Amino acid sequence: MNLKCETIKAAVSGDKKAMDEVLNEYEPYMMFLSIIVRRDKDGHEEKVFSQDAYQMLKLKLMEEIPKWKEPRK
């Protein structure tokens, strides 16, 4: 992970560029989690990308970033 603490803090403060950097960093993970397995009537499996799942994950991350708090030492 290449995110710097300053970038996260800026995203929490509402900096759009910083928010985009955070989203870009997590994009591969969200894309992986958006792959779903479909089965046809014969039981054959097919992995497909779900744009809906991806958008839900992205939205959830955008909602959670402003709630981030630095861990206490």
Image (tube, rainbow, N blue to C red):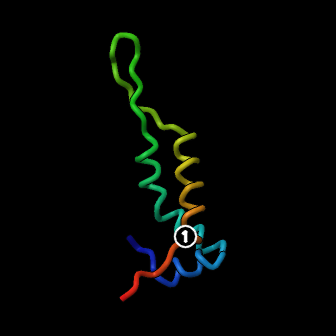
Question: Looking at the picture, how far across and down is residue 32, in whole percent?
Answer: 41, 47
In the image as oriented, which residue stretches furthest toward the front?
Answer: 72
Q: Secondary structure at mark 1?
A: helix
Q: Is residue 35 above or below residue 61?
A: above
Callout 1: 10 Å neighbours few (<14), some, many (20+)? some
Q: Is residue 47 above or below residue 9?
A: above
The residue depicted at 42 percent of the width and 35 percent of the height is 36
Question: Looking at the picture, how far across and down is residue 51, in whole percent?
Answer: 56, 40
Q: Is residue 67 left or right of residue 43?
A: right
The residue depicted at 38 percent of the width and 26 percent of the height is 46
In the image as oriented, which residue stretches furthest toward the bottom?
Answer: 73
Q: Is residue 51 above or below residue 26?
A: above
Question: Looking at the picture, how far across and down is residue 10, in whole percent?
Answer: 59, 80
Depth order, front residue of 22/13: 13
Question: Looking at the picture, how far across and down is residue 62, in whole percent?
Answer: 59, 62
The residue depicted at 48 percent of the width and 37 percent of the height is 49
* Residue type at the position of mark 1: Glu
Residue 73: quadrant of the picture: bottom left
Of the 4 image quadrants, the one containing the N terminus is: bottom left
Q: Which residue is mark 1?
A: 21
Q: How many marks?
A: 1
The residue depicted at 52 percent of the width and 77 percent of the height is 8
